[in-house]
Image (cartoon, rainbow, N blue to C red):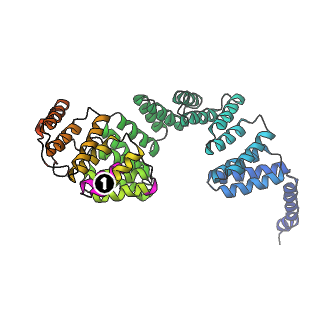
Amino acid sequence: MTPFYTMVRRIAPLFALLSLGLALAASPADQAGSRLKKGNNYYLQGEHELAIEQFNQALKLDPKSAEAFRLRCRSRREAGDLDAALKDCDQSVKLSPGLAKAYVSRGLVYEKKDELEQALKDFTQAISLDRGYANAYYYRGRVYQRRKKLELAVKEFSKTIELNRADYDALNSRGIAQVDQGEYAAGARDFLNALELSPGNFYVLHNLGWVFEKMELPLLALWNYNKAIAIYSEDPDLFYDRGSLLYRTGDLDKSISDYNRALELDPDSTDAYYDRGIAYFDRGQPGPAIIDYSRVIEINPFAKGIYHYRGRAYLSMGVYGAAIDDFNEAIKRNPEETYAYFYRGLAYYDLRQLKQAVADLAKAIEQNPKDAQFYYYRGMVLKDKGDKKAAEADYRQSVKLDPDYKNYPYQGGAQQDNSDPRARKGE
């Protein structure tokens, strides 16, 4: 054994004892700080329960750590335990009333609880403590946006961008607020600037598609939707919005395909069932449309206009009893549902219940005297009743309101007369 090796063997235990002494000498606050660091790393990885355990240990070591309470509040918020999160943030504020971050963390809990007024107060308090706190302005702007105070929201997002020009979330949010104000070009600019800061951000691309659609630039809208879906194909809203655009451009097959995918990702999307039903109906498939409309009613029986639409699908199939039942329900829910009267009138016409048909068509005319098709069809009913003079008067009025009606002579009933392109008007 060499002298050097012998020396190492003798002094190794001394180094071990020294390391142990240093570890034991670390203060509780230092040990708590180490726990906070580990907990924060878990938080950033989305491991909130593991993060909470680290913060629990930190608080055992340092029970008066405002930061430990704040960080545990944040993790509990993300884990969905909002009441416990609020208690932690309250304690953080109590221990350190000058800590701006504590108010922001508590404000985010209030925002998640939909207690927006309390959230607004906390974000405002954070700003009063730190005028350069960019995120506090951003979150305050987000609350204003949710409360539809769009001018104030734009102002807050602008301040955030002034303080942090790399904040693409603030640019994206300001773009949304500006589009909601009708400022489409300004919104598009913000989305494009956000995309420069965050290339390939599918959410921003989605918003670009949305604003270009509003600007009546369907090709640009479709390009951005396609690019967003190529990056991330698990967002049901993306497929729904692209499907809606494709529907409006007349591509029913691709529209239905996108609604199918949206429903695979979100099986309870009433909007996707609703609009797929409309697309099926327009493609001449009232049966699948009825199935989709019925699913909407099952999920949300108060969906606007749903009984009217399903009634029309039943009417097109000649299932008059079900159609009339649905139109009755539509009118019961909304006595101003003009087209429910109109289509119920057509159902009665096909059933040769002419008195009821005239009454419903008259009600539709009363509610909307400027729709030519109402006069046209009432004229057809009156003609079949033998009141030729009144029928001619209605026919003349329909042509006066829409000269194209001179090309559609009175013939048949609601099912038989498929030549009238306005028979689907008002959908």
Up the image or down, 299 lies above or below 203; here it is below
- Please report the residue visible at 66 percent of the width from the left and 39 percent of the height from the top: 107
Q: Main secondary structure of the magenta part?
A: helix
Q: Is residue 81 above or below residue 174?
A: below
Which amino acid type is shown beneath numbered disc 1? Ala
Q: Position of residue 244 (x, y in %)?
A: 34, 46
How many neighbours does mark 1 have within 10 angstroms: few (below 14), some (14-19), or many (20 or more)? many
What residue is shown at x 64% (from left), y 53% (from top)?
A: 80
Horizontally, residue 39 falls left or right of residue 425, namely right
At x 16%, y 45%, the residue is: 385
Q: How many marks?
A: 1
Q: Quadrant of residue 147?
A: top right
| Image position of 93 (left or right of 16) | left
Image quadrant occupied by the C terminus: top left
Q: Which residue is mark 1?
A: 323
160 horizontally vs 75: left or right: left
Q: Is residue 91 located in the magenta-colored stretch of the structure?
A: no
> Does the image show residue 177?
yes
Residue 248 percent coordinates (x, y): 30, 43
| Rendered location of residue 178, percent (x, y) | 46, 30
First to last magenta residue range: 298-322
Residue 302 position within the rendered picture, expressed as x and y whole percent measured from the top left: 45, 49
For residue 254, above or below residue 375: below
Q: Nearer the viewer, residue 166 or 244?
A: 244
Residue at coordinates 74% horizontally, 55% vertically from top-left?
54
